[in-house]
Image (spheres, rainbow, N blue to C red):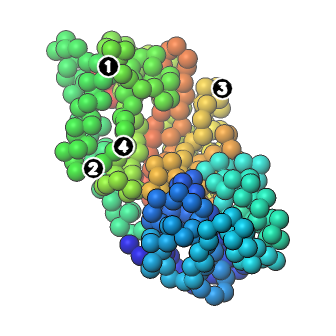
Amino acid sequence: MPLLQGLDLPALREALAALGADGWLLYDFRKVNPIAGRIIGDTGMGTRRLFVLLPRAGPPVAVAHRIELQPLADFPGEVRPYGAWRELHGHLETLVRGRTLAIETSPRDQVPYLDRVPHGVVQLLESFGARLVSSAPLVSRFAASWSAAELAGHRRAAEALAAIARDALAWVGAEAARGGEVRDTGVVQRVREAIERAGLWTNEGPIVAFGATTAMPHYEPHPGADRRLAPGEVVLLDLWAGPGRGSVFADQTWMAFAGRAPDAEVRRVWQAVKGARDAAVRFLRDRWRPNAPVSGAQVDDAARAVVRDAGLAEYFVHRTGHSIDRDLHGSGPHIDNFETEDARALVPGVGFSVEPGVYLPGRFGMRSEINVYIDTGGPEVNPRVPQEELFLV
């Protein structure tokens, strides 16, 4: 695709004016900055440093090494080639001196998904007289936002994954009822095959955990070290997939119990987790206003309050949700006031997971995960029918 394809330059210039910046300076080297790739497009191998300035006024400017000019043949602006480092520095100083520029930094590394430009590059640009500000609002609006096609693909993937999860847990129940052996790696293989049959693509996973391993949020079952499901154990299934590589994925977690009646502690934890999930969505719907969006940190607080009131706060050990864009854990706003303070606004076009969890070490864990897209009219939840009760398998 042509470079900068689909970027709304007039809207970007308005956003730069609101930010008080003269331009957005995108830096990449060996694909360290996925945000740059999302905005610019495919610039080839990336074995040399690349700078692209999107100015508030005038055409874009690229500073690229002479051995990597071919991918820039259709660049819609000026390309300034360099070879030696002194030549690179000369181009950069001319380009940035006296300008206020937005780049991918996060003060004190507050949000690492946004902190993509190395400290040495920051020092270099500042030595040339640039004033640097965080590109956070630009990333949310122009890099993390979904297209209409991506939203449609996400919706399709979300409904397919929900059906796959229900079918997989029903199979677990049928096998357990007849006395068959159900192992976590067997469920993993079954889910992966179902994802492929549905025409979806996933890079890895799913996470399938039984009993004590459900208390490990990122447990990975392996052949030879897998577990057999036993009566009375909690079952966790976390699965993710999208229409294809580089697409916007759907990401869900479903919970079950191997038995007819979970005990009071299992029910208590499930109700806390589900209540926190629903509180996050309710907060978004109640507070959503087009001109006064809420932050991911505020939504995290709303979910975390439910778990705290249930007396389980110390066992909720991760953020409430992560950004989703073309990366499953994307660069947009996260639902987080725990691991980081993500104060970025949840603006129309961004999507994210809502997945509160409670993990009792050595016993069991619970997580309920859905996805939310912020439309111009407010939040949209996928899948359309989230899990309400534990599956009894």
Q: Is residue 144 above or below residue 62?
A: above
Q: Tell me where residue 309 appears, x and y as whole percent.
A: 65, 32
> Which residue position is annotated with label 1?
223
Q: Tell me where residue 95 appears, x and y as whole percent.
A: 71, 77
Amino acid carrying mark 3 in the image: Glu
> Which residue position is annotated with label 4?
203
Amino acid carrying mark 1 in the image: Pro
Q: CA distance from mark 3 to mark 4?
A: 32 Å
Most foreground residue, 142 or 345: 142
Q: Are marks 2 and 3 in contact (CB under 8 Å)?
A: no
Q: CA distance from mark 1 to mark 3?
A: 32 Å
The mark nearer the N terminus, 1 or 4, is 4
Q: Say which element carries label 1.
A: loop
Q: Say which element carries label 3.
A: helix
Q: Which mark is residue 314?
A: 3
Q: Is residue 91 above or below residue 279?
A: below
Determine the residue positioned at 34% across, 45% down.
Answer: 202
